[in-house]
């Protein structure tokens, strides 16, 4: 069923932003709606309008750079997203959301792994019961080849957020690396059944059938 707000709220907000470009709240509200609908490129535009309307950013504005950074990352503009995350941390150091997003993205790309691990560990220290941040810590260890350590953190992440496909998929990968192949297939199957989609689903189905490729084929980029 179409969301009626898409036809009412969004056009009204766009008109308001055009009429009052200095209205930061209107731009942010529209950007948040667009981002929530995964229209990340459009969301970037309105987060940028909001940021441009602020004469001197303060600590309270960290979240604008954080959210715009996410839209850049989702539209494959990682250097711009990375810069926004750094700005967010300059405005408000040690925000766990930013530490986690930046650290996890680095780890997932195989970049700055030691620094990523440190950032994520700090985020976990600040929010020890957040399953998604604990998952990031486990995944950073996985990417570093610390598979036993990865299993410990990823098991805890799944216990904290058991219904997330990505977390279960990560745990399956770690189980496979430590030789717990039956448990790996179980976790991958669970991730599939939890609603994995698109490319992630195709990769999970391949792993259920054939496992992970040998270590030489999965070398972490330097």
Image: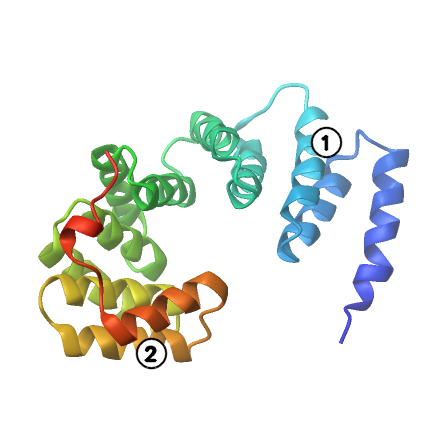
Residue at the disc numbered 2: 190
Mark 1 burial class by Cα count in 10 Å: few <14, some 14-19, many 20+: many
Left or right? Give the position of 11 relative to 137.
right
Q: Position of residue 89 (x, y in %)?
A: 43, 30
Query: Farthest residue in the top direction?
Result: 56
- Corner quadrant of residue 161: bottom left
Residue ID for mark 1: 49
Query: In the picture provided, is 83 more to the left or to the right than 214?
Result: right
> Closer to the camera, 180 or 51?
180
**Depth order, front residue of 1/211:** 211
Q: Which quarter of the rendering shows the N terminus?
A: bottom right
Q: Earlier in the sequence, mark 2 or mark 1?
A: 1
Q: How is the image coloured?
A: rainbow
Look at the picture and state if 86 lies above or below 35: above
Instruction: Please indicate, yes or no, whether residue 156 appears anywhere in the rendered image.
Output: no
Q: What label does residue 221 carry, if any?
A: none
Circle 1 — which element?
Answer: helix
Residue 95 drawn at (x, y percent)? 40, 39
In front here: 202 or 33?
A: 202
Task: Identify the residue shown where x is 26% and y is 52%.
Answer: 139
In the image: residue 175, left or right of residue 51: left
Residue visible at 71% across and 38% down? 46
Q: Residues within 10 Å of mark 2 (few under 14, many from 20)?
A: many
């Amino acid at each position: 069923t179409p969301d009626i707000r898409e036809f009412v709220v969004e056009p009204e907000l766009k008109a308001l932003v055009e009429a009052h470009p200095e209205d930061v709240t209107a731009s942010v509200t529209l950007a948040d709606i667009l981002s929530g609908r995964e229209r990340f490129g459009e969301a970037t535009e309105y987060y940028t309008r909001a940021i441009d309307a602020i004469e001197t950013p303060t600590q309270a504005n960290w979240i604008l750079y954080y959210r715009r950074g996410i839209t850049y990352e989702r539209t494959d503009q990682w250097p711009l997203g990375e810069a926004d995350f750094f700005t967010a941390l300059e405005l408000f150091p040690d925000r766990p959301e930013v530490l986690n997003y930046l650290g996890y993205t680095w780890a997932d790309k195989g970049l700055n792994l030691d620094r990523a691990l440190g950032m994520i560990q700090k985020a976990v220290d600040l929010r020890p019961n957040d399953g998604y941040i604990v998952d990031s810590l486990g995944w950073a260890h996985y990417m570093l080849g610390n598979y036993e350590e990865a299993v410990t953190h990823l098991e805890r992440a799944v216990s904290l957020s058991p219904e997330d496909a990505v977390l279960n998929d990560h745990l399956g990968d770690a189980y496979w690396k430590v030789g717990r192949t039956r448990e790996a297939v179980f976790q991958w199957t669970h991730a599939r059944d939890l609603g994995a989609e698109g490319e992630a689903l195709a990769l999970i189905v391949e792993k259920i059938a054939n496992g992970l490729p040998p270590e030489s084929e999965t070398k972490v980029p330097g």
